[in-house]
Image (cartoon, grey):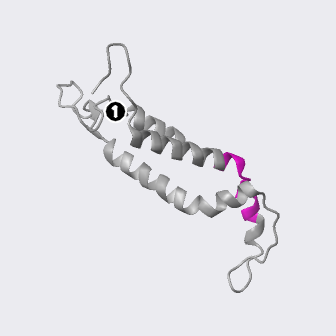
Amino acid sequence: MSGPAGMEPPEDPQRRLLRERLEAIQIRTEKATSWRDSTGRLQSLINREGYVPVTARLAGEDLEFLSAAREELLSLSELGIRLLDLHQPRDAGGITSDTANPILRCRSCMWRWPCPTFRAMSDALT
């Protein structure tokens, strides 16, 4: 359903909520300190029980990020998998002189393969 001529249709509430959630994750992640550099040093401190006995100074943003990281990353990975399931190549069915390399289109959005969604995901994940 669209609005009056020249006006955009109202935004889908589910799409808006997903965007807000992704933006909140992004903001929280940007504020948190990366643990990447610390993990190399911490690996050498693992004791016989398999734990690292450490005392650390963490900012509130760090704790907030760490407390939700697992669930949020699981949600984002599920989203990525579902998007990959939707956006995959299929034969466009056209006649081509190069039968070894047929023209492909995205099965979901019908853009020429690789579609913009797949390219954006690929750029972000590589």
At 32% across and 42% down in the image, what residue appears? 88
Please tell me in which quadrant of the rendered image residue 2 appears. top left
Tell me which amino acid carries mark 1.
Trp
What is the x, y in percent for residue 79? 42, 50
Using residue 4 as the reference point, say whether residue 91 is left or right of it: left
At 41% across and 36% down in the image, what residue appears? 117
Judged from the image, the secondary structure of the residue bearing numbered disc 1 is loop
In magenta, the rendered stretch is: 29-40
At 32% across and 13% down in the image, what residue appears? 5
Q: Is residue 72 above or below residue 8?
A: below
Q: Main secondary structure of the magenta part?
A: helix
What is the x, y in percent for residue 29? 65, 49
Is 79 contained in the magenta span? no
Residue 126 in sight in this render:
no
Using residue 114 as the reference point, say whether residue 30 is left or right of it: right
Which residue is under mark 1? Answer: 113
What is the x, y in percent for residue 4? 32, 16
Is 35 contained in the magenta span? yes
